[in-house]
Amino acid sequence: MKIVQNYNIQQVIKYVCNSFLGVTTLVFFISNQSVQAQNTSYNQFSNEFSDVESLGKKWTLEFNLGQSYTSIPPNNHSPFAKASQFYLRGWAHYYASSRWKLSYFLALFGNVSIPDIEQAKNFEIRYALQGTYYIHKIGYSLLTRFRLEDRRIQNNAKTFEAYYRLRAQLKYTQPLNGKVIRKGIYYSVLSDELFVKTQAAITGKDFFDRNRLTIGGGYALTDDTQIELLYSNEWLPRSGGNLVYNSYQINFSFTDLFRKYKDKNKSRELHSVDNGN
């Protein structure tokens, strides 16, 4: 007797996400088993201001402004010891459905001091295509995101080297005192992201770039304004010695910050994919 099974897109993506979660758990376990003497740890602090502006029911524009600081091991462990990076990024988002969001961004980074690629006072231009899918909702939000980045990094000769990086993220968001994130709601955030990359002189020959585990929480000051406090642990396996980044973040998110009078006929509808950012 032949049994035929039908799989829809949601089942396939759930399977992929479960597999992804298993892989990231294994990677995190392996990273913790690394010899501590071979690790160089950096403490960092970063912040970001983000605003999303509606362009009708299917499109939005997003603007990000951020900066970060880093410690200088082994003598100075303060996350504010030295300026590390600043960036300006612009997004265009298209809502293909209530569950799918397709995005493109262009960004300029000032790499003042980036330890893993030995950057000092150089610039980076970055382009990316991204797809975000909202999986299901039972009192929480679960998103999966895939991003392909084209990075053009300036070297010490002031020429730009190009390489590609693929990022895959699974993100869980849980409102704590309500069902959806709106004014007065606290929420928790947990995510894990894998990075792989192509070879380049400035970034090395390693195919696996890093794993980023993030945990934290946020509060909705209004329906359109949120603040988040996050901690991220990044593990970067390198042939010359592993790097570990302990990053503390504070992020501010706004919606239609520059629109003084909202036109309801032109405002974007809230889609499922918006839950959990």
Image (cartoon, rainbow, N blue to C red):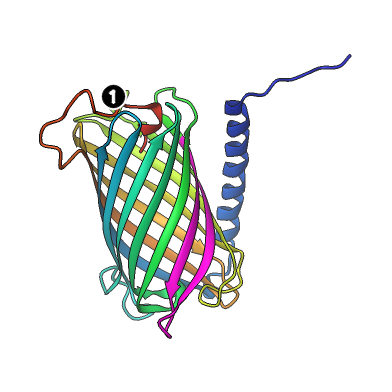
Image coordinates of residue 191 in percent, x first then y, are: 45, 45
From the image, which quarter does the N terminus lie in? top right
Image coordinates of residue 171 in percent, x first then y, are: 45, 40
Residue 151 drawn in magenta? yes
Q: Judge whether 60 appears above or below 120 on screen.
A: above
The mark tally for this picture is 1
SS of the residue under disc 1? loop
Quick one: 87 or 179, which is closer to the camera? 87
Q: Residue furthest right?
A: 1
Where does the magenta region start and end?
A: 143-168
Q: Is residue 234 left or right of residue 38?
A: left
Residue type highlighted by circle 1: Gly
Q: Is residue 182 left or right of residue 262?
A: right
Image coordinates of residue 63 in percent, x first then y, are: 27, 50
> Which residue has dot 1 on it?
178
Q: Judge whether 40 appears above or below 8 on screen.
A: below
Quick one: 157 or 202, which is closer to the camera? 157
Please name the residue shown 32% across and 56% down the image.
89
Q: Judge whether 248 appears above or below 185 on screen.
A: below
From the image, which quarter does the C terminus lie in? top left
Q: Residues within 10 Å of mark 1 (few under 14, many from 20)?
A: few
Q: Residue furthest left?
A: 260
Q: Is residue 254 left or right of residue 211?
A: left
Q: Residue furthest top?
A: 1
Quick one: 230 or 277, which is closer to the camera? 277
Please name the residue shown 46% across and 74% down the image.
117
Find residue 200 and report its image quarter. bottom right
Residue 126 drawn in magenta? no
Image coordinates of residue 220 in percent, x first then y, are: 22, 36
Q: Please name the predominant secondary structure of the magenta segment in the image.
A: strand
